[in-house]
Amino acid sequence: MGYAIISVGGKQYRVREGERLLVDRVALDDGATFTPPVLLSGGNGDVAIAPSDVTVTVRVVDQQRGPKIRIGKYKKRTGYKRHTGFRAALTQIEIESIGGRTARAAAKPKTETIPETAPVAAVPAAGLPAGYGELTVVQVKEAAAGWDVATLAAAIEFEQGHAKRKGAIAALESALSDREGES
């Protein structure tokens, strides 16, 4: 990698491997390493905004204080004079590496992720209406009003075991409590 833009202490820095920077105080001991969020990576002609597979490893070199800034207040003809100073708390960091995948990410087995908008796979379960797995949360909420207690219990069990959609579970539990209240 050529360079990266990272965020440390609410500020953005353009960094390269081996660089040392003074940043606002980082609450870590000297020698500790951390990985700040990467906002952009580039170099060698390719630029990626908010890359998920690029990590920047940063080592804390030293805790320092900035130069003293003198602040003076004065009002004429009143004898009012005040002097104070300020020294910023800073941390010197060194960019150890700007890399592609980390060892942990490479070691993880690749799993297929299901998008949030995709319907839940239709797993046949006893007591569920036909096509329940393809229903969205809104459709489950609307349809649950007409189901009996056994169907609602089976749907809750399915959601807790397979789909884990919080909105559907809440809608089913609400409909179940309404059904049990009528009895």
Image: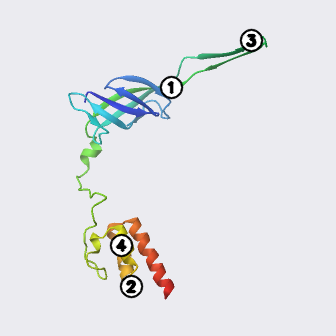
Which of discs 1 and 3 lies nearer the camera? The answer is 3
Which badge, 4 or 1, comes first in the chain's sequence? 1
Q: Secondary structure at mark 2?
A: loop
Amino acid bearing label 1: Leu
Tag 2 and tag 4, C-beta contact below 8 Å: no
Give the label on residue 148, or none: 2
Q: Nearer the viewer, residue 88 or 122?
A: 122
Q: Secondary structure at mark 3?
A: loop
Tag 3 and tag 2, C-beta contact below 8 Å: no
Please give the name of the residue rendered at 58% of the width and 21% of the height, measured from the top-left corner: 87
Which of discs 4 and 1 lies nearer the camera? The answer is 4
Amino acid bearing label 3: Lys
Q: Which residue is mark 4?
A: 140
Q: Give the quadrant of residue 40.
A: top left
Q: Nearer the viewer, residue 165 or 21?
A: 165
Q: Give the quadrant of residue 119.
A: bottom left
Which badge, 1 or 3, comes first in the chain's sequence? 3
Amino acid bearing label 2: Asp
User: Which quadrant of the rendered structure holds the N terminus?
Assistant: top left
Is residue 32 placed above or below 77 in the rendered structure? Answer: below
Q: Give the quadrant of residue 134.
A: bottom left
Residue 142 at what x, y percent from top left? 38, 74
Q: Which residue is mark 3?
A: 76
Q: Residues within 10 Å of mark 1 (few under 14, many from 20)?
A: some
Q: Which residue is mark 1?
A: 90
Horizontally, residue 86 falls left or right of residue 73, namely left
